[in-house]
Amino acid sequence: MFYALLVIVRGTQAVNLLRGVIVLVILVVVFSGLFQLRAVSWLLRATLPALLLAIPVIFQPEIRRALTSLGRAGSWITFRGRHEQVMAVIQCIVRASERLSKIRYGGLIVIEREIGLQEYVDTGVNLNANISAELLVQIFHKDTPLHDGAAVLRGEQIVAAACVMPLSTNTKVEERRYGLRHRAAIGITESSDAVAVIISEETGSISVAYNGRMIRKITHARLSNILAAFYQPRTARTRSWIRRILGIKTKEHGE
């Protein structure tokens, strides 16, 4: 249980808050048992009940992430089309990413999986168009009004573009000075099980974000393999392979 708690709060602001709670408990024990400081020990003891009520508010992002992980445990991906359909969607994403990378146009493609992203879809422009590499490239063309934001994919369709994604609250992400597009990709994968493909406008490099982690500077062939793994049902072998690819260069979000 303690290990599960530490895994949930690892790399978040909750770590410092958890340390503060531990220090406060130690102070109560020390002042009450050793120094017999009645006024200070009473004040600390009176603070603990209020702190217990404040814990759900303070740790709200971590609790939400834990409940989300519990809710999707053992479930399958929403899009269970035929193998040919799945591969066609993947190839469209890969071709669009390759073209955007060559011309140095930034892009953020968010793939909806089991957890719905309708609240973020509503912030953009509805398209409900069949997915194609040409359409994705056109969406992220710098002279179009839809390029600023994320394109959300649901099944075989681009449901919306210019969608606003939540930025990551992870302090390590801010320290590494990620751009807003990369922070938004990490943010949406922290609050859902979506997969995000990011094309850097500055370097043209392609990255993939999932579960709050990022794999950076990947090749087109590797992008195809990674997306194929996420589109498959979650067998034990698939989960092991996903954990392995996420374990590569993820100690500091892929750097």
Image: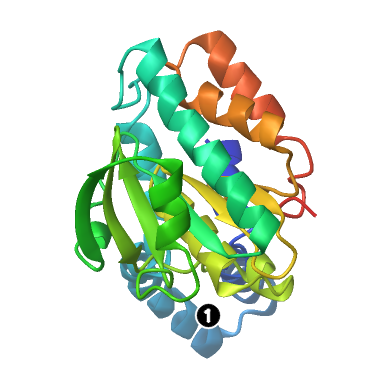
Residue 135 drawn above or below residue 60: above
The way the protein has been coloured in the rendering is rainbow
Residue 51 drawn above or below residue 1: below
Q: Is residue 248 left or right of residue 181?
A: right
Q: Residue at x 34, y 75 (%)?
A: 50
Q: Residue at x 19, y 63 (%)?
A: 122
Residue 100 falls in image quadrant = bottom right
Considering depth in this image, is 211 or 67 the residue closer to the camera? 211
Residue 202 placement (x, y as % from top left)? 71, 70
Q: Is residue 190 visible?
A: no
> Which residue type carries mark 1?
Ser
Residue 244 falls in image quadrant = top right
Q: Residue at x 51, y 30 (%)?
A: 91
Residue 95 placement (x, y as % from top left)? 56, 39
Question: Dot 1 surroundings within 10 Å: few (below 14), some, or many (20 or more)?
Answer: some
Considering depth in this image, is 189 or 101 the residue closer to the camera? 101
Q: Residue at x 52, y 60 (%)?
A: 107
Q: Is residue 219 visible?
A: yes
Q: Is residue 246 left or right of residue 160?
A: right
Mark 1 secondary-structure assignment: helix
Quadrant position of the C terminus in the picture: bottom right
Residue 9 drawn above or below residue 238: below
Residue 182 placement (x, y as % from top left)? 58, 63
Residue 186 placement (x, y as % from top left)? 54, 57
Instruction: From the image, tell me which residue sits under label 1.
Output: 41
Considering depth in this image, is 185 or 84 the residue closer to the camera? 84
Considering depth in this image, is 133 or 161 the residue closer to the camera? 133
Please state the total of marks drawn on the protein image.
1
Residue 215 falls in image quadrant = top right
